Amino acid sequence: MLVVSLNIDGRTIEADENTTVMDAARGAGLQIPHLCACDREGYAPIAACRSCLVEVAGEVALVPACRRKVAQGMAVTTRNDRIDNVRRLVVELTASEMGEVEFAGQTSTTFGRLARSLDVTATRFGFDAVVTQPDTSHPAVVFVADACIRCGLCRVACQDVQVNGIVALAGRGTETRITFDHGRSLGDSSCVSCGECIQVCPTGALRSGAGVAGRMPAELTIERTAETICPFCSVGCRVELGIAGNRAVIARGADGPANRGRLCVKGRFGFDYLAHPERLTVPLIRREDAPKNPELHLTGADVLTLFREATWDEALDRAAAGFLKVKEKHGSARLAVLGSAKSASEDAYVLQKLARTVLKTSHIDHCTRLCASIPPLTEAIGTWTVTLPFSHILEADVALVVGSNPEVNHPVAASFMKNAVRRGTKLILIDPYRQPFARHAAYHLQLRPATDVALLSAMTHVVIAEDLIDHAFVSQRLEGFDDLKARVSAYPPEVAARVCGVPEESIVGAARLFAKAPNAMCFWGMGASQHAHGSDNMRALIALALVTGQVGRRGAGMHPWRGQNNVQGSCDVGLLPMCLPGNRNISDAGERAFFERLWQTDIPGERGLTVVEILEAAAAGEMKGLYVSGGNPAMAAPDLAMTRRALASLEHLVVQDIFPTETAAFADVVLPAAALAERSGTVTNTDRFVQLVETAVPPPGAARPDWEITCEIATRMGARWNFDHVGAVFDEMVRAVPALAGMDWATITRERQLQYPLSADPSNGGSLFATVFPAIGGKARIAALTNGSPGELPDEQYPLILVTGRVREHWHTGSMTRRAKTLDALSPESLVHVSAADFARLDLNDRERVEVLTRRGSVRLPAVCDERLQSGVIWMAMSFFEAPANDLTTRHLDTLTRAPEYKFCAARLIRDESKNIGSDNQT
Amino acid sequence: MSNHLIRTIDGAVVNIVDDVLAHHDATSDRALEILLQLRDRLGGITDDVLVRVADGLKLSRAELYELATFYPSVRYHPTAVATRAAACEDLVCALVRSPHSAGEREATRDESYLCGGSACRGRCDSAQDVVGTGSNVVHADKADWRTLESYRSAGGYGYVERLRRGDVDAADVLAAIERSGSASSVVRKWRAVRDQHGEPVVIANASEGELGTFKDRHILERDPHGVIDAALVAVAVVGARRLIIYLRDDYDHLYRELQQVINEMRVAGLGADVEFDLRRSGGAYICGEETALIASLEGQRGRPREQPPFPTTHGLFGRPTLVQNIETLYRLRAAWGMRVEASLPVTRLLDPAVRIFSVSGRVCCPGVQLMASLPNIAALIAACGGMTEGEELGGVVLGGAAGSILTAEQCRLPLDDLLRAGIRIGSGSSVIVFAQRDDVRWIAAKMAAFLARESCGQCTPCRVGTSKMAGMLAGGPLDPVLMRSLAEVMREASICGLGRSAGQFLAGAAERLQGSAEC
Ligand code: SF4
Ligand code: SF4
Ligand code: SF4
Ligand code: FES
């Protein structure tokens, strides 16, 4: 990095030699007009609009400030008669490419502001006379060609930044125009609705779809903006909400540490759930005449009919009294708490404190259990977090991704992964599904479902056999290598090739690529973890990373994907049955003593039950009282028939949520909570960034932040806590969680985000464990496998493999995203995906209604043919109330993580004989 | 939204696509060549083909669609393959085929005559006959080029062999070129490429696309070895291993010819250590511009890149790149002693005093003219047998689409006076002759429409400017103030020479038409 000094309009400015004249000027507070430039990461200069032209001394031609790099001694003039005149003409000519009506509508756009600043109110060159119809075929994105000035920013947005590759600047000369895919309409294109193009378009030619909160209704002007964190995945994108009349009406990507201005479809279009009419606004108490019926599967307004409104006092009294009664009658061990990884850390902390110190139970868990991608990493190296942020992939030579479809589940992170591939990172993808993301992969090992252990072991076999291991790492930092060597000797690549259905050369090639990479990263997702043998999958992968020494450097390390926005935070604060806050072992009396001092009371010392175990216990009559805060087990847990029976059998169920969920249908008391955007607190993303959220909009009606409600219950049960403000919770949390050491509320409020541990060596950029691991002895340990296998294999009766997952537009059980208009319009119904071979064999028609059956239940829904699936496999999303995939899934749990096997069960698919006569006529 | 999970494509087409893909290392920089080969076999590119190629190359559909719609030679249509393209509608063909006097023009107010049809294919010397497409041109292209044997017996390839053997070295070559009085830019470029780090590439640019220009075709039809010989010397001097010949796609006869020429050389063991890469342009005029040409070879749309950096340091895939056009290469051999042969007129180009012109339009014998001295343009017309029968000289368009429209009087002025007055002949040396009864405004409109179509479309001043300019010239009263404003912004703000010279042309046209309106 070399700093040069240049002169802009008479001022001497210092700038890095790699900056552009425009950036250097901006750094000095000088704005040079521009249309096709964007100062965000990933936007290379286009230099096509020519509105930024400046004079450089010694050069005859004008120079685009957005592209020209600074140089020592350069003298730049940004304004004089010549420049002003040319700039005005450029803008006037630009206007003439628009339709007259659209030009007139340029009031609040970048282009409109520039034109006004240059007094361009009309064009002598004549507006484009051809009036075209806007493309309104897509629910989220509308394209108004008459407003387009072909600046090309949307193309860079879609092709280079988000790397979705939909927007094209097609044609040549006068015919140059914006198109989608190969000249499709937007609705017919593969647009994934990230909205990046909308965010950067300087004229509003690309704008949000009609009738959506994402769109700024014409009559509303944005009164103010406020930031929050997207609640829809663990990337933790920072969002700027535009607010009118106390409603969030538009969302833009803000400059967060993880997203750097980017969003995905959920972050962009998912916020209108906040103002959905079904929001819970008052506390509710179950009506005497509304029995709990496990046969009924209700949601939304239907749930409300079971309740009557109550005051906060009455509802809280009732909630607390119910718990006290169970405690007296059955004992503390019959009480359980289920939290949520989408609440703030302060909520989770207070909730587990209530469980341990007031209810006196260890049965406390939350939905992180269901993704469970971390425990094998803890087992191996002692960490409870990723070893490095996902953005390090930009510095990695190779990235190995196992059991993950990041473009759907972590789209913003996936965009950085694709940026990395474009910059030369080689991607190895191990996943049975031929997902579109696979086109970026150097190797896509499309293995047969549930054969990951064989494949990964074979790769390790190759690495050991060809002596590609990191000897220094293995000898100094690793235990258990010999056992591993013995174990993988059973998996020569030719054997794995047969088991996995992957060519032997690919296994060998991928193994070499990974091992020889100077720096390689591993990512894994729910495709690895959500199996009865999920831990083995992850152990096999971790072993490969360890023997090759791919950890502890910039661009080298392990990054398991997490599901929800605050998985890291809620685990850190101990919303877990086996860990106290700070991931301290509950069985350790010393650790317990610390908390008993901190909390001034005794706490239970035995390990509690996990999510599915709690529900099973309830079904067996062994759990009597349950407090569900933010979770929705009646949709999220496997085997919903059993789950509903469990919930219905409880003597006392308190559900605290923002919507009347499927779970609330079984509640005795329902407490209305504030959403994340309606309160302050912190959430911790997958990269260990603790991020501040503040109240962007007020909560509806009487709804209150979760932590406040929980404190009220605690008080009513006799606790004396002094949490007068969320900051007080944060400060106590810091004392309880060593990872947060060095933080306090004042600092986080000021800094807005802090990556822990604060003590990490900044030169490693957040990649941990350069020399020692936090495990006992400081070494990594290769764990033995349990040699588990799927809990249920296909047989004659149930010959197909059912895999469940998520669609891009919906999050988890859909309680929020199904209530976001655009998202529901984009993905309105559950579909069962059937491989081409099975689709043909079953002689199905596109979108024909079918029945999917397993030993647990059956659902009816339309089928689509999916050429990307392997034959014998069917796939369903979990988020649809109308056809809940979890009616079908099994309760087989992984022995270590206790995560259910969402990714594998035996199923049968038949034509739906009960369908309406006449549905055949629908086309 | 729609079900993207299903694809259908005709089985026979699948086989052809897969066959072509299999013959290339599936890298995206081959995309244009792959599309052109598929066009050769299928007649054009339809959506199902496009989708399959995109998947095969791991490109997004949008990326490939951009290429397919940028390059007209790809002959993309979503569903149908056109069997035959329309007749050439560009200036020369349109002029010769149908007289457009001012009166007639008024009578047929039909916008379609402004480049509505097909584009110039570089056969302006046989303008009446130009119909059909790149793959089925209906007129006799010359095919009797000088053989390798004959070329060698005239001393061809001798110098490059000596260079290879070490009898002479690169410094000698550069010195010889310098002495020979060739354009100093040649030596400067060769040195720059040679001194740069990284493996250099040499590109012989046979993608002439200027309106009314066909001189490179003329040379390659007659003496292709003369061009390749010089290119091999360049390859040796700059230390390259790869020689790309970038050929105008319309010259499909030359494509076959050059394939044979390269084969002949292989058999003869010439240039054995050089990787020959014969590539075709996509039919976009702008790809005659060096940086656009390079972009197209990288599998991108042919959009000029702002310079610096220059191709000599950051060219093809960032490598030092020498781009040299055909005429320059052909003439260069004089530096190492290749001499004019009386039996082969084209070799007169080895004499630096001889100028080459592409003359088209209303003359008796349009074609390439080699002139040792040229008093004025009228003499050039005389050399072409004079005006076609019954026509009076109205003037000429000198220098192609953005060139100057000269009056008949100017044609009679000494050429040196014109040059001194700032009129440029242009690298294509294109001279389009028109008659007195031809409508100058119509000619100007044709030129503008050509520029609007051939603008790469990248920068606003050129994309919108050429289109507005074409609109202004097409009809209605002319507003000289507005024309000058437009000319100014195009000249000042366009990225590359096309937009800037289009602005220049407009300024000239404003003056010329204003003048003609007054008199
Ligand atoms: S919304 Fe996203 S995916 Fe869709 S066109 Fe815009 S940038 Fe591309
Ligand atoms: S749609 Fe917007 S961003 Fe895209 S080219 Fe047009 S004006 Fe620019
Ligand atoms: S001046 Fe014209 S041809 Fe040149 S870059 Fe601009 S648009 Fe393209
Ligand atoms: S902002 Fe520089 S050319 Fe557009």
Image: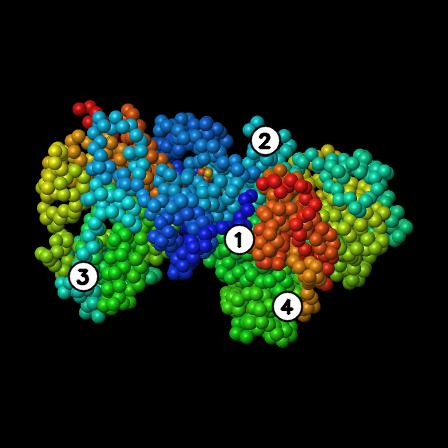
Q: Say yes or no: labels 4 and 3 on the same chain.
A: no
Residue A486 vertical position relative to residue A809 in the rendered view, above or below: below
The three-letter amino acid code for the residue at tag 4 is: Ala
Which image quarter holds the N terminus of chain A? bottom left
Residue assigned mark 2: A223
Which mark lies nearer to you, 1 or 4?
1
Q: CA distance from mark 2 to mark 3?
A: 79 Å
Q: Residue at x 73, y 52 (%)?
A: A857
Which image quarter holds the C terminus of chain A? top right
Pick the residue in front: A847 or B305.
A847
Pointers 1 and 3 in contact (CB under 8 A)?
A: no
Q: CA distance from mark 4 to mark 2?
A: 54 Å
Q: CA distance from mark 4 to mark 3?
A: 73 Å
| Mark 4 closeness class: few <14, some 14–19, many ≥20 residues within 10 Å | many
Q: Say yes or no: labels 1 and 4 on the same chain.
A: yes
Residue A487 vertical position relative to residue B415 in the rendered view, above or below: below
Residue assigned mark 3: B147
Q: CA distance from mark 1 to mark 3?
A: 52 Å
Residue assigned mark 1: A436
Residue B224 vertical position relative to residue B355 in the rendered view, above or below: below
Label for residue A780? Answer: 4
Question: Of label 1 and label 4, which has the lower sequence position?
Answer: 1
| Mark 2 closeness class: few <14, some 14–19, many ≥20 residues within 10 Å | few
The three-letter amino acid code for the residue at tag 1 is: Pro
Residue B219 picture location, percent across and down: 19, 53
Q: Chain of mark 1?
A: A
